[in-house]
Image (cartoon, rainbow, N blue to C red):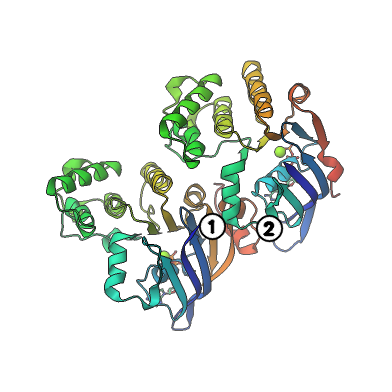
Amino acid sequence: MLEVKNVAKSFNLKNLDKGKFSVIRDACFNVNSGECVALIGNSGCGKSTLMRMIYGNYVCAEGEIYIDKENILDLKAIEMSILRKQKMGYVSQFLRVLPRVSTIDLVMEPLLDQFESRARAKDIAETLLSRLNLSSQLWHLSPLTFSGGEQQRVNIAIGFSKDYKLLLLDEPTASLDRENKKIVMDMISEKKEKGSAILGIFHDKEVRDKVCEREIDVSNFSAS
Amino acid sequence: MEQILKAKAINKKFGDVYACNNLSIELYTGEVVGIVGESGSGKSTLLNCLSGSLVPDGGNITYLDRDNNWLDLLSLPEPRKRNLLRTEWAFVHQNPRDGLRMAVSAGGNIGERLMAIGYRNYSQIRAEATEWIEKVEIDAIRLDDKPSIFSGGMQQRLQIAKNLITKPRLIFMDEPTGGLDVSVQARLLDLIRSLVRELGLSVIIVTHDLAVARFMANRLIVMKNGKIVETGLTDQVLDDPQHSYTQLLVSSILKV
Ligand SMILES: Nc1ncnc2c1ncn2[C@@H]1O[C@H](COP(=O)(O)OP(=O)(O)OP(=O)(O)O)[C@@H](O)[C@H]1O
Ligand SMILES: Nc1ncnc2c1ncn2[C@@H]1O[C@H](COP(=O)(O)OP(=O)(O)OP(=O)(O)O)[C@@H](O)[C@H]1O
Ligand SMILES: [Mg+2]
Ligand SMILES: [Mg+2]
């Protein structure tokens, strides 16, 4: 489902023209449908950077990234935004949403984008939010004032509302308690059974042992 | 995935100033494109050229109309162009005074647009005007007031209601929420976003505000000195800018 080939990444150094610094070199790996693969490695080694390149959030100037056999580096921006809507979910560590939009509307949004009916979208969203133990009193409020753990669960609900072929998870369980962590692990397992390919960053070894079939150490791709 | 507007090699000079220097852009149906850049970089000039309110010195602009015909906008007869602006397009101006008739009541301003697309029934016009003025969070009892006595923010909201009520296919917006407080701004941006989704509208939005760009636009165009310096997915341009000017623009404001 996902194939990363000889990918490299460097950033321009801030403070004018000091050149570039390389983070990743020669990254190669793949993720098949129905499996969950963990990116591991020390802080700053480039796990999130690699994931963001796959999502098209960071520019990938070198290498190839195939999603469903299509090299995303050949796509125009408009094509990439369609590919995201159709095939790829991304749960980032932090929630970033428009103020004043209610939680339930935010979770319904990806479904409405795919022309689900409002009633069905609402149904799916409510089921997810209940499952993630978000009190229904919160559904009609913007999540921007929620606690860290609540915000993270809203983020997860948004990312899990559809059955994406590829799901990218950047520390989705970092600020969750045991009970909610267990629920998210179950949700990951269900997505795998439904055939999603999942790439995740989990600092929590217990989570990796439970849901991941393989680990990829990103520090092996370190450029330094 | 279908194009709705194509502009090629647009040039516009004011004296020695190149406000638009060989600009090409394409817009797809259902897409929101944001244009950002510093003051004087040519954003409004580009928008005015695209929407036919300014004639470029050179270039080519085509638009796919409701009946699936590609129209050459630069050679389109003036009455047809005005008709497009009233029916298939909307233009939300930076200054609400440019988009409203100040001597006509708020309800009249909105009703006018409906009449232009064929509404004749007074009570129906009144009902829709009431619905829309409430959507932009203006109390319906203000329907018979003239916009000249509205606050700047209310005028801007009225202008947006007036433009969106006819459900145009293509919307040009120049700093549509510039003078509004953050909470009203968020409400309006969300309204525009739902309409884009429900009706498959296409939007070009010029803004100084990178937060507005992030929440509204699928794709971003960064302009400097009349040129496009960078374009790409909005979050990519903002989170991993490639051009040194964009890097400066992104880092010079608070994190969005
Ligand atoms: N937008 C950016 N601009 C410049 N440098 C960046 C950017 N994003 C990441 N980096 C740099 O790339 C390197 C890798 O960062 P990344 O966030 O990928 O690490 P990580 O492996 O996810 O670490 P952690 O486990 O702490 O989250 C770091 O040195 C970071 O400063
Ligand atoms: N009618 C005009 N006559 C002369 N010069 C003009 C005219 N309109 C625009 N200009 C010049 O063209 C350049 C681009 O102006 P434009 O209004 O397009 O900028 P902008 O990017 O919209 O800026 P802002 O963010 O301040 O609205 C500026 O240098 C401006 O002074
Ligand atoms: Mg990280
Ligand atoms: Mg302007």
- Is the same chain shared between marks 1 and 2? no
Q: Position of residue B14 (x, y in %)?
A: 43, 80
Residue A96 in the image: above or below residue B32: above
Q: What amino acid is found at the position of numbered circle 2 in the picture?
A: Asp
**Disc 2 within 8 angstroms of ligand 1 (CB):** no
Q: Residues within 10 Å of mark 1 (few under 14, many from 20)?
A: many
Q: Position of residue B95 (x, y in %)?
A: 32, 61
Residue position for label 1: B220
Q: Residue B85 carries which label?
A: none
Q: What amino acid is found at the position of numbered circle 1 in the picture?
A: Leu
**Subunit of label 1:** B
Residue position for label 2: A74
Residue B250 visible in rendering: no
Is B14 left, or right, of B248 in this rendering?
Answer: left
Task: Give the CA distance from mark 1 to mark 2.
Answer: 18 Å
**Disc 1 within 8 angstroms of ligand 2 (CB):** no
Report helix, strand or loop for mark 1. Answer: strand
Identify which residue, A132 or B80, lies in the foreground. Answer: B80
Report helix, strand or loop for mark 2. Answer: helix
Frontmost of labels 1 and 2 is 2
Q: Position of residue A198 (x, y in %)?
A: 70, 34
Q: Where is residue A97 in the image (x, y as percent from the top left)?
A: 51, 39
Q: Which residue is drawn at 29% across and 75% down?
A: B78
Q: Residue at x 57, y 32 (%)?
A: A155
Instruction: Name the residue at the bottom extreme.
Output: B15
Identify which residue, B116 or A155, lies in the foreground. Answer: B116
